[in-house]
Every structure is written in structure tokens, then in C-alpha cells.
Amino acid sequence: MTGEPAVPETALGLVAQAGGLVPRGTRVEVFNRIYWVFLILGTLVGIVVISYMLWKAYKYRDTGERPAEDEDEDDDRPTLGELPTGSGGGKKLFLSFALSTIIVVSLILWTYGTLLYVEGKTTQDSADQIEVTVEGYQFGWRFIYPNGHRSTTLRVPEDKTVKLKVTSTDVFHNFGIPELKVKSDAIPGQETETWFVAEETGNYTAKCYELCGSGHSYMQADVIVMEQSEYQDWYSQTTPAPEENDSGPESGEGESTETGGESE
């Protein structure tokens, strides 16, 4: 959000960056890395736990045999209605809890530091970035460019940082572009900042992820990622659009602002 400290301004961010632990790159790269780290670790933990359970089930299976009275019984063998008396159980339990705690806390700190880096970039202005204001309304999106041009289609160049200032003119909305890992609240009277870098040209769809009324499911907008030269040509031909009232926003390109019907 606006005013949120960037990663270097936090103690956790300093530690994480100093150790090279925070993944860098676009939002897609960062969130994909988080996904794969949790998937791989979760798979390994699952394999270990299930293998251990299967081994214990096999080791202590009921074969119908009973040890003779003069034979030593396995101290670790569970007996119905009795607590285990083995000497190594307490140490194993302690080590398992300690190892689990270390892994979970490490993942929490790493993930939090990564998210601070991702969202903290919005406060680090760059002369090379493009800034677009996103306004949500029932039931559509309008995009306002630095020169005052307004559109219901978001056009951006590839391989450039796009800074979005997201807000709403009526009720709570949530602006998201799933393929680009962008998701930000649209709150009336407030601006929420986020960013993304689109590495490939193409067409995407922005959606609302906050239930906002009867036309919520139709609240979508086209996102077009263009080559940088093509974007510059398009942007140089745009002109500011007149201010509009809340009853019916106009588009700077003559596009209809209604992206869907008024009811589901």
C-alpha cells in the first residue's frame, strides 16, 4: 500500500537481502519460486512421514507370534493400554518437534521477507517505469495514464515495470491479473499500489476478486501487452479524456466502459 516501507527499510528485509535469500525478478518469477519451494519441501516431508508410518506399521504388524517369557521384548513395541517405556522416545520426540519448528519458522521468515520485497518495490520510483491509475466502479475498470488519457483497456509495454495505483469510486473491489500474479484491493478514497512486469506480448484479462454486486462476475477488462515501440506509437497518439461523473464514465478511446451486463 501507499507508504509501505520497502524491504531495505526493515530489519527482516536487511537480513534476508544480505544473505541473498530474497528471490529477485518479476512477480511471476518470485511467486513461482515460492510455489516450487513449498511444493518440493511439502513433497519431501510427505514422503518421509508416510514412509515412516508404513515402516512402523510393517515393523509392528501382528504376526500371531508371541515372544517367550525369557526373551527380551522390544522396548519400543506399543502395548495396548500401556504407555511406551523406551528410553529413546523422548529424544526422538524432542528432535522431531525442534526440526519441525525450525523448518516452519524459516519458511515463514523467508516468505514474509519475499513479500516485503515484492510489495516494497512500489515505493521505489524509477524514471523508467510506467504509472497507471486503476479505478474500479460497478461494474468495470478504467485506466488513467499520466497524460490524462482514460481507457477501459489497459495497454502496457513488455519488459517494463508498470506501477499501478488502484482505487474505487463506489464500493470495495479487488483488481487482479492472474497470469501476471497481480492482485490489489480497490478501496474508495484510498490508493493501493502494486506493480508488475510483463515479459511477453499478448492479451490478458483483469478481473474483480471482491464480491461487489450483481454484476461482479462480469467485471473484467482487457490487458494488452505490446512491444515497446508499438506502445510508444500508441501512447503518443492518445489524448486526455474529459472528466466524467460517476453515473457513466467515458473512455478516451471511444470504447464502451461496460464490460458485461448489469446482472448475472
Image: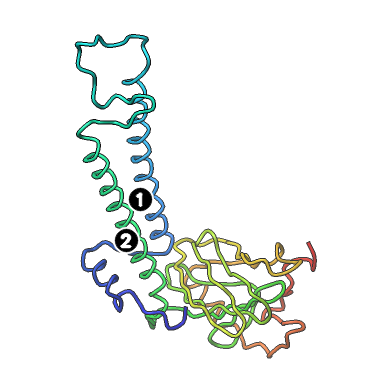
Tell me which numbered mark, 2 or 1, is placed earlier along the sequence: 1
Q: Amino acid at mark 1?
A: Val
The dot on residue 110 is 2
Picture layout, residue 136 above or below residue 245? above
Gap in angstroms between the C-alphas marked 2 and 1: 11 Å
Q: Residues within 10 Å of mark 2 (few under 14, many from 20)?
A: some
Q: Name the one closer to the observer, 71 or 137.
A: 71
Left or right: where 61 falls relative to 203: left
Name the quarter where the C terminus is drawn. bottom right
Residue at 31%, 21% (x, y): give it: 59
Q: Quadrant of residue 197?
A: bottom left
Most distant residue in the bottom direction: 243
**x and y, in percent, of residue 27 in the image:** 42, 64
**x and y, in percent, of residue 241 in the image:** 66, 87
Picture layout, residue 29 above or below residue 1? above
Which secondary structure, mark 1? Answer: helix
Q: Quadrant of residue 140?
A: bottom right
**x and y, in percent, of residue 202 in the image:** 54, 61
Which secondary structure, mark 2? Answer: helix
Residue at 35%, 59% (x, y): give it: 108
Q: Amino acid at mark 2?
A: Trp
Q: Residues within 10 Å of mark 1 (few under 14, many from 20)?
A: few
Left or right: where 175 falls relative to 16: right
Q: Name the one closer to the observer, 252 or 95.
A: 95
- Type of colouring: rainbow
- In contact (CB < 8 Å): disc 2 and disc 1: yes
The dot on residue 37 is 1
The dot on residue 20 is none
